[in-house]
Amino acid sequence: MELLILSLLAVHCSAVVSNSLQQPSGQNRLEEVMIYIKNVKGSLKNNEHLINTPPENTEDCCCLTALECYRSNLLQHFNSTHERPVRKLLRGLKSKITEETMHFCNSNNTTSTCQDTCEMHPKKSAKEFLERLESLIQRAISMLTPVN
């Protein structure tokens, strides 16, 4: 009887570990996105191309809106010239895990000042655009990292 219970417990633990290894955590996904951003930055030839860029210190409730702006601008301004690195970055930014980790809005805050459209943001260089995206992702990683 004990052997049967131990066997069932081992099978259950194995299934849980296997499932957790197959699905990347939010922090792992965001760290992958950071690598993709660095790859796009490395393949960037025209750093001075101007792109509508969300603010550097995006409010907590505006992070998902900013993420959508980054995605649409990547499609519009980068996709044709940096195909593979941008495709990987877009896939990482479109991931459900990425979206869930970017949602750190305090539900009590109902007076958000998010820009409705991406075109309302000021234009910055492509280099600045990618640095701000990198900063936003780094901020999300720091929100997920437990404090000891």
Image (cartoon, rainbow, N blue to C red):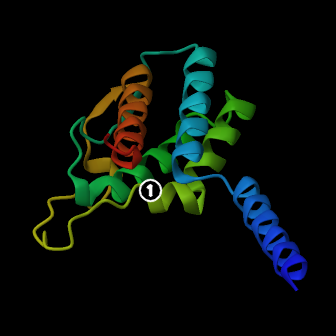
- Observer-nearest of 86 and 45: 86
Q: Residue at x 62, y 39 (%)?
A: 89
Crowd tier of the residue under label 1, counting other residues whose Cα lies within 10 Å: few below 14, some 14–19, many 20 or above: many
Residue 68 in picture, x, y percent from top left = 44, 55
Q: Residue at x 66, y 49 (%)?
A: 91
Residue type at mark 1 is: Thr
Q: Quadrant of the C terminus?
A: top left
Q: Image quadrant of residue 80?
A: top right
- Observer-nearest of 130 and 104: 104
Q: Residue at x 35, y 50 (%)?
A: 66
Q: Quadrant of the N terminus?
A: bottom right
Q: Is residue 7 above or below residue 132?
A: below
Residue 22 in picture, x, y percent from top left = 76, 56
Instruction: Say if residue 116 shows up in the picture.
Output: yes
Q: Image quadrant of residue 130?
A: top left
Q: Residue at x 55, y 36 (%)?
A: 31
Does residue 132 appear left or right of residue 106 in this picture? Answer: right
Total number of numbered discs in the rendering? 1
| Residue, disc 1 | 101
Residue 2 in picture, x, y percent from top left = 84, 80
Instruction: Say if residue 115 shows up in the picture.
Output: no
In the rendered image, the residue lying farthest to the bottom is 1
In the rendered image, the residue lying farthest to the front is 2
In the rendered image, the residue lying farthest to the left is 111
Residue 105 in picture, x, y percent from top left = 26, 63
- Observer-nearest of 38 and 21: 21
